[in-house]
Image (tube, grey):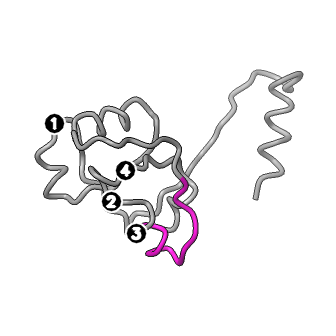
Amino acid sequence: LGDLADARWLDAPDAGLPLPQLRAANGGHGFRPALRYDGTDLRVLTGLVAAGHGLTLLPRSVAAGVPGTAAVPVTGPRVVHRIELVYAGMPSGAARTLVEALSTRP
């Protein structure tokens, strides 16, 4: 779960797991909201996720009843972010800047 602490999260306390509970499970760190949803409609909440506005955590039993959701275990496998740049020849301009930025990331 800690691997997802820096992801974009939806703060939807009346529909999903409240972010303060996720923070508490992660030692009080991470899980900052990218967007707040004050409604209770799970279809709207999952629509926001599908549109790329952020992640939410729902119990498997709830998610199973919402069309378009998928249960993804948060304990494994470890989520890995991968960025690739495919460029013919030596990159220049913006492509070179991207390569340099990615090369300095830990």
Q: Tell me residue 2's x, y (percent).
A: 51, 68
From the viewer's perspective, is 67 left or right of 98? left
Is there CB contact under 8 Å for labels 4 and 3?
Answer: no
Residue at 46% from the left image edge and 74% from the top image edge: 24
Q: Amino acid at mark 2?
A: Leu
Foreground disc of the pair 4, 3? 3
Disc 1/disc 2 C-alpha distance (Å): 19 Å
Which residue, given by chain and number where applicable, does mark 2 sit on? 17
Q: Which residues are magenta?
A: 22-32
Residue closer to the observer: 83 or 55: 55
The three-letter amino acid code for the residue at tag 3 is: Gln
Which quarter of the rendered picture does the C terminus lie within?
bottom right
> Does 29 lie within the magenta span?
yes
Amino acid at dot 1: Pro
Residue at the disc numbered 1: 67
Q: Residue most toward the front?
A: 38
- Residue 63 image position (x, y, % from top left): 19, 50
How packed mark 1 is, by other alpha carbons closer than 10 Å (few <14, some 14-19, many 20 or more), is few
| Contact flag, marks 3 and 2 (Cβ < 8 Å) | yes
Query: Label for residue 56?
Result: 4
* Residue assigned mark 3: 21
- Neighbour class for label 3 at 10 Å: few (<14), some, many (≥20)? few
Give the left or right position of residue 99, taking residue 26 as reference.
right
Residue 44 drawn at (x, y percent): 27, 34
